[in-house]
């Protein structure tokens, strides 16, 4: 038997296909079947990627399979009037006998080619300039001077004050300084969220919308993970057992082996 669109928590399962064996009908004839006992059932559950886009209200995100237990998410995420390019990975695992859980990692909303936001509190997380953005600073005197005019930024970049003073007076020396691999590496390590609190004007000069800088800290890891969650649970049957087994990711969605025992269907 094949049952389409089975409700399972936040989503619907595109298809449940099962084979029941040794079914015993409670009937007085073909026209009066009151119910049935299903002692054994085996089948497959499909959670379609196409359905996920629609039901999780993430139509701008595309889910694709990435190996046997991983799903890749790519798309856009609207934040403060901007469409950020979103990248993330999810690992799919069985949770108990009836549920599927997703562990979201590698979440990276990109602000064009300007910066990348990684939600979290570690040093490698936060809002960081992209390599292309740092390269532009090396060729745009106004942005380079704005960055080097903030003592807190200079300290984080590890540039001696004498070198900074010389660079601010001479554009050739400014270009030499900002064009070095060391400067690019240090500049990409700056957490712009921290800078925005004390130096909002600097971030505006670098091309950031203040509204976006205000909204990003609220885009936490749990908030993003919830938006990208692919988890679901099968409804608990009124009698017997229904279990999920052998979770695997396929091209079109997440497929799980289904096993049941001692089930009852209809009125008894």
Image (spheres, grey):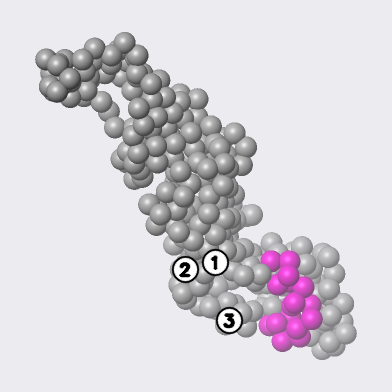
The residue under the point 33% across, 23% down is: 242
Q: CA distance from mark 1 to mark 3?
A: 18 Å
Residue identifier under label 3: 204
* One can see residue 149 in this view: no
Residue identifier under label 2: 79
Highlighted range, magenta: 130-146
The residue under the point 75% across, 77% down is: 136
Quick one: label 1 or label 3, which is nearer the N terminus? 1
| C-beta proximity under 8 Å, tags 2 and 3 | no
Mark 2 nearby-residue class (10 Å; few <14, some 14–19, many ≥20)? some
Of residue 230 and residue 35, the one placed in the foreground of this image is 35
Quick one: label 2 or label 1, which is nearer the N terminus? 2
Quarter of the image where one finds residue 65: top right
Of residue 217 and residue 230, the one placed in the foreground of this image is 230
| C-beta proximity under 8 Å, tags 2 and 1 | yes
Residue 188, horizontal then vertical, whole percent? 70, 64
Label of residue 84 in the image = 1
Quarter of the image where one finds residue 186: bottom right
> Could you tell me which secondary element the residue under label 2 belongs to?
strand
Which image quarter holds the N terminus?
Answer: top left
Quarter of the image where one finds residue 12: top left
Residue lying furthest front: 30
Q: CA distance from mark 2 to mark 3?
A: 17 Å
Q: Is residue 103 left or right of residue 191?
A: left
The residue under the point 85% across, 69% down is: 180
């Amino acid at each position: 038997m094949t049952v389409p669109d089975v409700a399972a928590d936040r989503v619907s399962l595109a298809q449940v296909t099962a084979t029941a064996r040794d079914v015993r009908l409670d009937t007085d004839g073909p026209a009066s079947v009151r119910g049935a006992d299903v002692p054994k059932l085996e089948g497959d559950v499909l959670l379609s990627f196409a359905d996920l886009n629609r039901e999780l209200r993430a139509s701008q995100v595309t889910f694709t399979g990435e190996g046997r237990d991983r799903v890749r998410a790519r798309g856009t995420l609207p934040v403060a009037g901007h469409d950020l390019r979103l990248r993330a990975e999810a690992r799919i695992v069985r949770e108990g006998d009836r549920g599927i859980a997703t562990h979201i990692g590698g979440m990276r909303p990109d602000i064009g080619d300007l910066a990348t936001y990684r939600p979290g509190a570690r040093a490698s997380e936060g809002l960081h300039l992209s390599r292309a953005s740092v390269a532009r600073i090396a060729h745009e005197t106004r942005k380079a001077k704005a960055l080097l005019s903030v003592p807190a930024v200079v300290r984080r970049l590890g540039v001696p004050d004498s070198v900074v003073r010389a660079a601010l007076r001479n554009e050739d020396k400014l270009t030499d300084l900002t064009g070095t691999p060391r400067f690019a590496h240090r500049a990409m390590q700056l957490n712009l969220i921290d800078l925005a609190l004390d130096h909002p004007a600097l971030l505006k000069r670098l091309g950031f919308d203040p509204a976006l800088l205000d909204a990003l800290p609220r885009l936490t890891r749990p908030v993003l993970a919830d938006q990208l969650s692919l988890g679901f649970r099968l409804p608990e049957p009124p009698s017997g057992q229904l279990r999920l087994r052998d979770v695997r990711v396929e091209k079109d969605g997440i497929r799980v082996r289904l096993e049941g025992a001692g089930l009852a269907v209809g009125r008894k």
